[in-house]
């Protein structure tokens, strides 16, 4: 297997390992008789894999932040087949666990330091637990100067050059010595252009402490997690990763989401349509491997303008169509902010099309949009 075909096969195998073995609420409703059994297909696929294929599988799993959730099951299959690559798989798991523990020790210290200047919450990065993202994302309402001073003086961090998008979003990136992961700090704003400020009140008030290994860190409530995921996936990157699908499926299956509150949070922010499309897209993908939809309420299903039928696997990720679907979501958000009288947020968001055009042009000529996004 080579190229796109190899990536597609690896995505399928990872999805079977991650979703085919989960016992979620949706799977229980569907019953064991209608639930797909991927065991034999996983075994058949693994039996045919060589070193190059396992290398591609590892690369894709790293990109999708699912090593610690997919590879233990993969390791068991490899051991049963006496594959010589089983030792490689075990090593990959060990290295990833070591990376995560190292990152958490820094993250805990950074949060404790910033807490002296204001509230600080770990967003996005820990949603993938026991996996971890490739950077460490924080939200804080602390003063900008205080955050920069803490990071530079306490941790000898270097402030990375800020792109146009970073400046609009009021986001700062730091490189900390001996920490491979960059630290990304969102200051009092969320969204691609920093247009969302009202939802940050809920983020701070409803956050809670949770244990991650030997570290206790503050994270968002389930509803706020979904809001941030929606902003990131449907309004910024326009693609989904397997970690997003698994994270969201487990959150929905947990029964911890207050959909009434979620709607009251998302609708005034102009994000309800995007949230509905995001959850329905995740639900459809889960169904293709688990045999049943996620237990989503009718009010959310009816609000979705599109679902998984439009999502395609391209360039290693599950791509959300930009025209016209994502553009319509952007227009709805902008209109709602304007109607709410949030003129600064609407103005910031109105700069997004120009920013996107500049990024596309820069990418065309240089192969990178760095300095813009």
Image: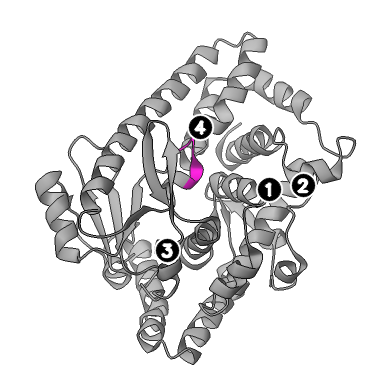
Mark 1 near mark 2, Cβ–Cβ under 8 Å?
A: yes
Q: In the displayed structure, does residue 296 sit left or right of residue 222?
A: right
Residue at coordinates 70% horizontally, 54% vertically from top-left? 283
Residue tagged 1? 253
Sequence-wise, the earlier of marks 4 and 1 is: 4
Sequence-wise, the earlier of marks 4 and 2 is: 2
Mark 4 vs mark 1, CA separation in Å: 21 Å
Q: In the displayed structure, does residue 347 sit left or right of residue 161?
A: right
- Which residue appears farthest toward the left when viewing the image? 153
| Secondary structure under the numbered disc 1 in the rendered image | helix
Sequence-wise, the earlier of marks 4 and 3 is: 4
Mark 4 near mark 1, Cβ–Cβ under 8 Å?
A: no
Residue tagged 4? 67
Magenta span of residues: 127-132
Mark 1 vs mark 3, CA separation in Å: 24 Å
Residue tagged 2? 26
Mark 3 vs mark 2, CA separation in Å: 31 Å
Per the picture, the main secondary structure of the magenta-coloured stretch is loop
How many neighbours does mark 2 have within 10 angstroms: few (below 14), some (14-19), or many (20 or more)? many
Position of residue 176 measured from the top left corner of the image (x, y, whole percent): 20, 43
| Secondary structure under the numbered disc 3 in the rendered image | helix
Of badges 4 and 2, the one in the foreground is 2
Position of residue 338 measured from the top left corner of the image (x, y, whole percent): 46, 89
Mark 4 vs mark 3, CA separation in Å: 32 Å
Of badges 4 and 3, the one in the foreground is 3
Tell me: residue 185, above or below residue 41: below
């Amino acid at each position: 297997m080579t190229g796109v075909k190899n990536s597609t096969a690896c995505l399928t195998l990872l999805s079977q390992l991650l979703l085919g073995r989960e016992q979620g609420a949706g799977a229980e409703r569907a019953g064991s008789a209608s639930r797909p059994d991927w065991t034999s297909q996983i075994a058949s696929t693994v039996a045919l894999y060589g070193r190059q294929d396992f290398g591609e599988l590892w690369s894709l799993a790293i990109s999708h932040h699912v090593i610690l959730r997919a590879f233990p099951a993969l390791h068991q299959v490899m051991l049963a087949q006496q594959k010589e690559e089983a030792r490689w798989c075990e090593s990959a798991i060990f290295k990833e666990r070591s990376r995560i523990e190292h990152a958490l020790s820094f993250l805990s210290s950074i949060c404790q330091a910033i807490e002296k200047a204001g509230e600080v919450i770990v967003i996005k990065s820990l949603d993938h637990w026991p996996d971890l993202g490739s950077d460490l994302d924080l939200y804080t309402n602390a003063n900008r100067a205080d955050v920069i001073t803490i990071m530079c003086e306490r941790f000898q961090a270097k402030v990375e050059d800020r792109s146009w998008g970073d400046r609009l979003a009021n986001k700062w990136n730091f490189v900390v010595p001996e920490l491979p992961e960059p630290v990304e700090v969102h200051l009092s704003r969320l969204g691609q252009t920093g247009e969302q400020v009202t939802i940050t009140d809920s983020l701070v008030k409803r956050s809670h402490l949770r244990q991650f290994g030997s570290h206790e860190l503050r994270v968002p409530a389930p509803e706020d997690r979904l809001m941030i995921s929606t902003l990131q996936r449907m309004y910024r990157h326009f693609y989904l990763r397997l970690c997003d699908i698994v994270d969201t499926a487990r959150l929905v299956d947990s029964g911890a989401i207050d959909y009434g509150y979620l709607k009251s949070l998302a609708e005034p922010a102009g994000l309800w349509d995007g949230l509905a499309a995001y959850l329905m897209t995740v639900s459809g993908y889960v169904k293709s491997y688990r045999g049943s939809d996620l237990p989503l309420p009718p009010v959310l299903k009816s609000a979705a303008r599109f679902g998984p039928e439009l999502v395609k696997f391209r360039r290693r990720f599950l791509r959300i169509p930009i025209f016209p679907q994502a553009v319509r979501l952007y227009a709805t958000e902008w209109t709602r902010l304007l109607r709410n009288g949030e003129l600064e947020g609407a103005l910031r968001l109105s700069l997004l099309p120009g920013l996107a055009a500049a990024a596309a042009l820069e990418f065309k000529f240089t192969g990178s949009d760095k300095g813009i996004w």
